[in-house]
Amino acid sequence: MTDERSPIEKSCNACGKTDPGTRSLKKCSRCESAWYCSQPCQKMDWKFHKEACTIKSQANVHAKALSKAIAGAVAAAAATLASPPSDEKPSESNHRFATDKFDVLDAEIAMPFHQLRSNRWLHDRSERDVFKLLIDSYRLRVGDDRPHCKDFLYACIEDFGRYLRQAESNRQLMPEWWTSEKGVECMLFASDGDDWSTAVVDVSERDIQRYYPELFMTLQMRVFAEQVLGSGSGGKNLMSTIEIYLIAEQGKLLTLIPR
């Protein structure tokens, strides 16, 4: 049976003018969802449309970034599968996590556990360092919560996007310069596979310890992920256990604390 329903008509968001063929109506260039018959109508409607436009446009940006990130992950996985097999056993020099292949952080911060307690662990860092710590704190948390997520890398990339949005929702955790556009850049950074910190490769606690020279980085990352998600892995509350590290940063020897 032929569907004889008439096509949905677009209408101007301001004056209500309809145009079945959308020959004269133009979409809002930011959110791509509202239609207008003229610039005066668009200007008149802006104070009413502004909030919805901002939310929709940010959602569009995240969706496009996610699509590009997934495409990058597919390409990285395809390249791995296409690589010819080798009879040579992996060694420390050619292992994916060999630290001499990648730069670590641009700089360490003073008293990191005090910074965690103040919700400023990502503050006063370079853009690249913030990206890396967001990605690696997520990867470590995935390893704690769902060790088999490595079999579903594309789902993990999408999940990293949710983790990132949760971090963004707590403005205290993010540096002052952070914007939704930086979130998109972080998603792309996480998907390209050109840095050690990439969402297309799983990571273990041991890998983090070998890669980062800073003491207790795995604990720092777990506490930060707890701040992002609201609880520690398995319901643990690691923030309540860092008092000894706070004391140590005030002058005690960190080497006395088991790593």
Image (spheres, rainbow, N blue to C red):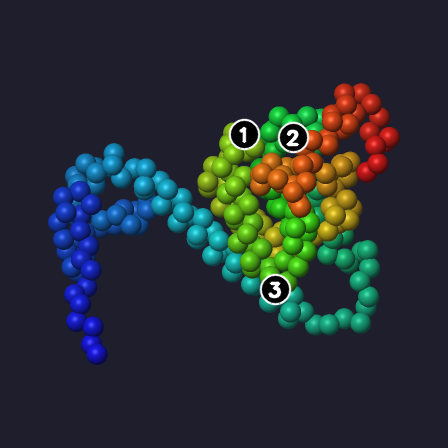
- The numbered mark, 1 or 3, whose residue comes first in the sequence reads 3
SS for dot 3:
helix
Q: Residues within 10 Å of mark 2 (few under 14, many from 20)?
A: many
Marks 2/1: CA–CA distance: 11 Å
Q: For this view, does 15 lie left or right of residue 223?
A: left
In the image, which disc is placed on residue 172? 1
Q: Quadrant of the N terminus?
A: bottom left
Q: Position of residue 219 (x, y in %)?
A: 72, 38
Residue type highlighted by circle 2: Leu
Residue occupying the point 44% across, 53% down? 64
Residue holding disc 3: 77
Tell me which numbered mark, 2 or 1, is placed earlier along the sequence.
2
The numbered mark at residue 30 is none
Distance from Cα at disc 1 to Cα at disc 3:
36 Å
Q: Please tell me which of labels 3 and 2 falls first in the chain.
A: 3
Q: Measuring from the top left, give residue 178's x and y in whole percent.
A: 51, 35
Image height of 43 relative to 117, above or below? below
Going by the picture, which residue comes out furthest to the bottom?
A: 1
User: What is the distance, in whole Å, between disc 3 and disc 2 at their CAs?
Assistant: 35 Å
Residue type at tag 1: Gln
Q: Is residue 209 visible?
A: yes
Residue drawn at 77 percent across, 58 percent down: 94
Marks 1, 3: nearer the viewer: 1
Residue that badge 2 annotates: 116
